[in-house]
Image: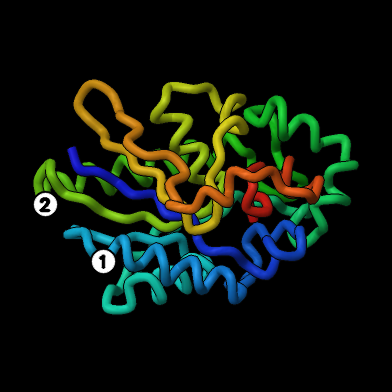
Amino acid sequence: MATVLLLRHGRTTANATGGLAGRQPVELDETGRSQAARVGERLRALPLAAVVTSPLIRCRQTLSIALPDVTPSVEDGLIECGYGDWEGRPLAELAKDPLWPVVQQHPSAVVFPNGEAMAEMSARAVAAIRSWDTRITEEHGPEAVWVACSHGDVIKAIAADALGLHLDQFQRIVADPASITAIRYTATRPFLVRLNETGDLGSVVPPKRVESDAAVGGGAGGGSV
């Protein structure tokens, strides 16, 4: 089967300020644009069979900088989790909500107020990736490599599925802004080829801000927003 490179969008203005963007039209900040340019240098060296993206502008901006000569296919199944009433609020404030520890410890049971269930997010994202991977393999062969640009929680859920982990364990996975997580699906099982690859060891330094240490999707990149 083909190999998919799951690319998280670059840092956004919401990442920088500790907010939960959700499906709001937040854009890349200067750091995010620089991250997209750097990851583009790595991606352009590969023979990419296809490029697919979440419909949200931060993913489309990332790809327009990283791969300016490519017109990506938009896949609604890769959109950010619908955080409902949580969207646009500071993570530090959300950390005081009674739902917060459930999100961190038992996400499979979480349905965000006026939003999406995390289990539904995981199911539709995994289904979208596997469907695209099958199609690309049929069209381009098992050696094909393709890119899917999405969001922190979405990528973590796909990686957890590839590892055979229950969704309640997906908070153990990190997907930093502009990182690449590579998965190769086979007839018997998936293989996690790369995880949170950025080429930058600076991301291993624990963040100082409490909200980015335990954001909705966790991780050192300012949370899954």
- The residue located at (68%, 54%) in the rendering is 222
Q: Nearer the viewer, mark 1 or mark 2?
A: 1
Q: Which residue is mark 2?
A: 139
Could you tell whether 12 is left or right of 19 in the image?
Answer: left
The type of residue carrying mark 1 is Arg
Q: Give how far apart the Cα atoms at labels 1 and 2 are.
A: 21 Å
Percent of width and height locating residue 160: 48, 30
Which corner quadrant holds the C terminus? Answer: bottom right
Percent of width and height locating residue 91: 80, 52
- The residue located at (24%, 60%) in the rendering is 50
Q: In this figure, what is the number of numbered marks?
A: 2
Answer yes or no: is residue 77 visible: no
| Neighbour tally class for label 2: few under 14, some 14-19, many 20 plus, Cα within 10 Å | few
Q: Which residue is mark 1?
A: 44
Q: Report which quarter residue 96 is drawn in.
A: top right
Q: Secondary structure at mark 1?
A: loop
Q: Secondary structure at mark 2?
A: helix
Percent of width and height locating residue 206: 69, 43
- The residue located at (76%, 64%) in the rendering is 17
Q: Nearer the viewer, residue 158 or 23?
A: 158
The type of residue carrying mark 2 is Glu
Which mark is first along the chain, 2 or 1? Answer: 1
